[in-house]
Amino acid sequence: MKRTIGLLVVVIFFTAMFAQTQQKEKTLTLSLEDCIAKAVENNLGVAVEVLRPELADISVSFAKEKFMPSLSLNYDTTSRNQASYSWLESADATITESSSYNATLSQSIPTGGNFSVVLSGSKYDTNQRLTSINPRYSSTLRFNFSQPLLKNFGFKTSRREIIVAQNNRDISEINFKEALQNTVYSVEEAYWNLVHSIENLEVQRQSLKLAQDFLERNRRSVEIGTMAPIEILSAQSEVASRQADILDAEAAVKNNEDTLKTIINLAAEAGEEADLLKIIPTDKPAYEKKEITFDEALLTAMNNRPDLQSMRISLKNDEINLGYAKNQLLPDLSLNASYWSPGVSGTQILFDKTNPFAPPIGTIPGDASDALKDTFGFKYKNWTIGLTLTIPFNTFFSRANYAQARVNLEQAKLQLENQEQQIFLEIKNTVRAVQTNYQRVQARTVARELAQRKLEAEEERLKVGLSTNYIVLQFQRDLATQQTQELRAVIDYNLSLARLDRSLGVTLKEKNIKFSEISAR
């Protein structure tokens, strides 16, 4: 009675634990397309890469600031009070007050030159005697132009930073696309590996059930006396072995499930419950034959591979840097030109012509606006033009920057050529893998069908005493092995198609993923 009660308690406990586990474990059905969408939305690696084009845009904007006009303003005022050294200068102390202002608008131009407009003015007021204009106002409007004729001349030279920044922005976008492609492939690989592990677990369970059914039949045969008890040992051993296979298969399911959860960053949506969710893949691997020739695949890869596109743009940057370094070896010959219009006004002090040392006899008022009228009316026209030649001796003795830029360009060309060779080999291997894996699927399907028929035939032979337990168990294991290998072949074929799309650079196109929509998030 006590034993019965204890057994009942144990059953109730494990039933409650099982019910609690079932309540905690929730399922999440996902298709391959769902997983790819979640990875694009939540994958942390993608989140890092999506910021790179934005940073590159900032660099382009910063480089373009070179051609934005700049305005500088300056104003100062001075007061001087010093002892007089002559009665002609002043009675006691010489007091002078002056102020000046300056406004400069400067603009770099695409040819490498600079244009500026400068408006300056000043006021001078003193108590010195014999001053004919006091206070005195002056102003000047000046136009300055400078243009390098050799060194730093030209559109490419002056816009080098902008062109390189724009190319780097294009490279960052291409690298982002490549990161997306790699992420999509990682999702496909993890998804199909999870499908394989789940299907393999089911195969192992079926194999275990076959072994358990076979063991049960042997037990009945032993009970009725048609089989020796020793014959049951091989069936028991096989059941134990297949139970161990199930444990390995269950661990593989968990491992692949965790890998997929990490890639799609399921925790971003499910939070702490992500570990409790069980992913149920809804897509099944198919093996529709894909016809593609090597020449067609190679041409597609050369036109679409992100790494090739990135290296070609980097090569353009190296060519620009080489041209700039070559330009810097030239003498610095600059054309400088200025045109300016001054203006002066103020209060004129009138003296007696017969005795200029007598006190002033009158004044003619004037103010700063009169000086500005003369300035902007170009009453007094002045100009200058000249050439400045600077020959740095370091261009004769050291050409390190030019040599370095030339070597960088040669290295970039060799790297591009080497990458093209590697892609040639990669495409050849990938196309061959697609063709081989499709043939493997067909061969494994035939092998599995034959293993099934062999097992059925051997079970019939056992019924009439023409076979043994060992042979039947071996045929059961052979069938499980062939089922697993057939499933592996189908998965490998799907993965080889995914690798082919990645190698061709068409993953995003094949999956209908639009780069512009992702980068705008």
Image (cartoon, rainbow, N blue to C red):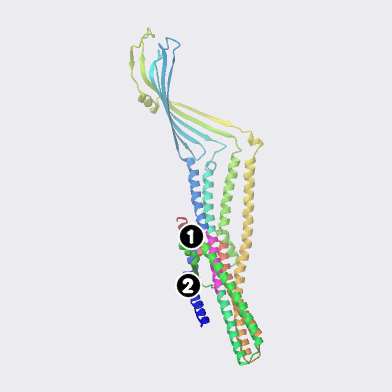
Q: Nearer the viewer, residue 196 or 175?
A: 196
Quarter of the rendering containing residue 241: bottom right
What residue did someone put label 2 on? 22
Residue at 48% of width from left, 58% of height from top?
A: 515
| Residue type of the residue flagged with mark 2 | Gln
Residue 182 among magenta residues? yes
Is the residue 388 above or below the residue 50 in the image?
Answer: above
Residue visible at 64% across and 90% down in the picture: 227
Q: Which mark is residue 444?
A: none
Q: Residue, x 64% and y 62% (percent of image)?
A: 425
Q: Amino acid at mark 1?
A: Asn
| Residue 428, position as x, y percentages in the image | 62, 65
Q: Count residues near mark 2 (Cα–Cα under 10 Å), then give few for <14, some for 14-19, many for 20+.
A: few
Q: CA distance from mark 2 to mark 1?
A: 28 Å
Q: Reply yes or no: does residue 440 show up in magenta.
A: no
Q: Is residue 324 above or below residue 48?
A: above
Question: What x and y, as percent, mark residue 498?
Answer: 55, 66
What residue appears at the point 65 percent right and 36 percent down from the top-left corner? 396
Camera sees residue 470: yes
Q: Secondary structure at mark 2?
A: helix
- Looking at this view, is 99 or 458 the one in front? 458
List the residue tagged with mark 1. Answer: 42
Q: Earlier in the sequence, mark 2 or mark 1?
A: 2
Q: Assign a secondary structure to mark 1.
A: helix
Could you tell whether 450 is left or right of 72 in the image? Answer: right
Question: x, y percentage for residue 151?
Answer: 57, 37
Quadrant of residue 97 in the image? top left
Magenta stretch in the rendered image: 180-199
Q: Nearer the viewer, residue 255 or 44?
A: 255
Report x, y in % for residue 489.
59, 73
